[in-house]
Image (cartoon, rainbow, N blue to C red):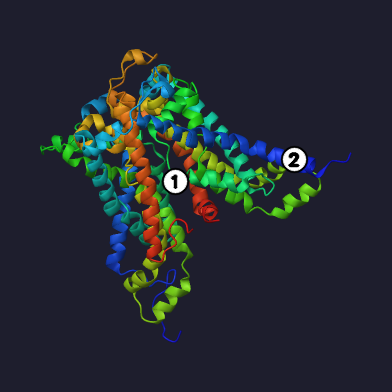
Amino acid sequence: MSRQRRYRLVNGQPPSSPQMRVLKAVVFTIACALVLVPFVGIVATSLAPAAQVTAAGGLVLWPSSIDLSAYRAILAGGVVTRALGISGIVTILGAALSLTVSSMLAYALTRRALPGRRALTMLLICSLFFSPGMIPTYLVVKQFGMLDSLAALIVPTCLSAFNVIVLRAFFSNLPQDVLEAAQIDGAGEFSLLGRIVLPLSKAALAVIGLFYAVGYWNSFFAALLYLNDTSLWPLQLVLRSYVTNGERIAAADMDSGIVPPQVTLQMAILVISIVPILCVYPFLQRHFAKGALTGAIKG
Amino acid sequence: MSTSPSARSLRRRLPLLLLAAPGVVVLLAFQYYPLLGNVIAFKHYLPFLGIGESEWVGWQNFEVIVNGDHQFVTALTNTLIITLVQVLVVFPIPIALAIALTSLASERIKRIVQSVLYLPHFLSWVIVVGIFQQFLGGSGMLNNFLRSNGYDTFQIIGNADLFIPLLTSQLIWKDAGWATILFLAVLSQIDVQLYEASVVDGAGRARQLWHITLPALKSIAILLLILRLGDALSVGFEQIILQQPAVGLEASEVLDTYVYNNGIVGGNWSEAAAVGLVKGVVSVLLVLGANKVAHMFGEDGLYRS
C-alpha cells in the first residue's frame, strides 16, 4: 500500500461519516430502549404499591416503594401457583425426555453400523418440509388417549428434527479416532455414547436442552388444543386469561386473601413467566457469541 | 466363545437400533402417521363413528375452496396480505441491522446491543401480546399519558384497520434482532482482504456495501426467502389466535385460524381438514417451486438434486 491513509480500517472498512455514526447511535439506542422499557415498566408496576398504581391508572416506570403483596398473593396458592407448578413439571420432564430421545437418535444416525441409516436420515430430514396438519395431529393425540393429560403437552412435540440434525452434525465432528480406539477396547455403543460422546458434548447438549426447555415453557397452543380441563392449564394459558384477555383475578382464585390492583397482579404474573427465561438467557447468549450453534448448523 | 459374523454384527446393530427407536417412533407417530388422518378430508367425519366408519363423500369438503365460501376467501386474502407485508417490511430489517451491527467499531457495544435485541425472541407470544396491550391498549401506558395531558387517545389494540401494522410491529419487536444471527455469521466470514483491496482501489463504504457486503449476503437471503415462501400460507398462528377476540374474524381470520375455528371449535372436522390438506400440499409445492427459481438464478437454494 503506497498511499498513507489518515484513518484506521475497521474490518477493512473505512470509518463511517459523522452523520452516519450519529444515525447508528440513535437507531440502536431507540431499538434497545424499545426492548428494555417494557421490561422496566412490567417489573416496576409489579413491585409498586397499590396507591401509586391506582393514581397512575396503569403502568408505572418506577416504583415509589417496593411492595411485594402481588407476588405474595399469586404465590400463596391458587390458580397461578398451580399453573406455575404444572409449567415447571412439563418444562423439566419435557426437556429431559427431548434431550434423551434426540441425542440417542442423533448418535445412532452418526454410526455406519446402523441398519437403514440413509433411510432414517431421509425420514428425519423430510419431516422438516411438511407439517401433518392441525386436525389430523389432534385426531392422533386423541386416538392415543392423551387428551386432557400433560403427556399431550410433551410427547407429540418432544422431537425437533432440526435439533436432531444440529446434534448429529456436532457428534460427527467429534474426534472419531477416540471412538474407534474405545471400540477396539471392546466398548459397546451404549458406553461409547454415555462415556465418550455425551461428556464431550456437554455445551451443545446444554444449549439444545435449554432450547427445548424454553419451547415447553412458552408453549401455549398445545395446551389450548388438547386440555379442556382448566385445572391442568400451564402458566401461558393462565397468562392468556388474566393478561391478554383481561379476565378479572378474583380473591377466590388465590388462597392468600389479599387482592392488590389487577394491573399489579397481571404484571407480577408476567414477571414470573419471564424470570426463568431471563435466568437461562445469559448462558444461551454466551454460546451464540461463541458461534457454537451456527458452526454446528453449517457442519 | 466363538460367535458367527452375523451374531457379532447383530450385537453392534441391535444397540444402535434401540438407540434410534424412541426418536423414530415419535417421528412416525406424530409426523408421518397423522398424514393418514387426512383421509377425513374425503369423508363426513363424525367423532362418535371414528375415521373408519364415517361415510365417504369424495370431494364435497373441498367445495368451500372451489366455490369461494366467504369465510374461507377472507382467511386466504388475509393470509396472503400478511405474508406479503411481512416479506416486504419485516424481511429486510434484520439484514440492515446485521450490516449496521458489523460496522460498529466497538466490540463491547456490539455485544450489548446483540444481547438486548435477541432477548424478545425467547418470550412467548402470550407475553409479547400482553406487553403490547399494556403499552398501546385503551388503558395502556401511551393512552394514559395522552389522556392525562389532554390529548386524544389512539385506539390501536382492537382496531381492525391497524391489525396488520400491529402484527407486523410485534413480529419485528420479537424476532428482528434474533433473525440477524444468520446474517451476522455470514458477514463474519467475508474475507477482510476484499474490503482492504477495495479501499486501495478507492472504494468508499457505499461501494463496499454494494459490491462486497450485499453480494455476500445474497445466498443466505435467497435461502431464507425460499423457506419463508414455503410458509407463505402460515402466518403467526399463536400471535393471531390470541388477538382474534379483540379485532374480530373479518380482519384477523387466516388459514390456520380458519382450520382451528371450523374444525376443533366448530366441529366441521372434514371441511377444516380439507382446507388444511390443500394448504399443506400448496406449501410443499411452493418450496419446490421457489427452489427451482433459485436454481434458475444460479443459486444453490435449499437443496440440489
Label 2's element?
helix
On-image quarter of the C terminus of chain A: bottom right
- Residue B228 appears in the rendering: no
Local crowd size for mark 1, using a 10 Å CA cut-off: few (<14), some (14–19), many (≥20)? some
Residue nearest the viewer, comparing B159 with A155: A155
Q: Label 1, on which residue?
A: A129
Amino acid at dot 1: Phe
Residue nearest the viewer, comparing A126 with A16: A126
Q: Label 2, on which residue?
A: B10
Q: Position of residue A212 (x, y in %)?
A: 50, 38
| Whether label 1 touches label 2, CB < 8 Å | no
Image point (27%, 25%), residue name: A246
Label 1's element?
loop
Q: In the figure, is residue A298 to the left or right of A67? A: right
Chain letter of the residue beneath label 2 in the structure image? B
Image point (79%, 40%), residue name: B7
Q: Which mark is residue A286?
A: none
Image point (31%, 16%), residue name: A250
Q: Position of residue A264 (x, y in %)?
A: 31, 26
Q: Where is residue B121, by image quadrant?
A: top left
Amino acid at dot 2: Leu
Q: Is residue A76 above or below residue B133?
A: above
Q: In the figure, is residue B16 to the left or right of B137? A: right
Q: Residue furthest bottom?
A: A2
Residue nearest the viewer, comparing A19 with B56: B56
Q: In the figure, is residue A187 to the left or right of B282? A: right
Q: Position of residue A86 (x, y in %)?
A: 47, 23
Local crowd size for mark 2, using a 10 Å CA cut-off: few (<14), some (14–19), many (≥20)? some
- Residue A127 appears in the rendering: yes
Q: Residue furthest right?
A: B1
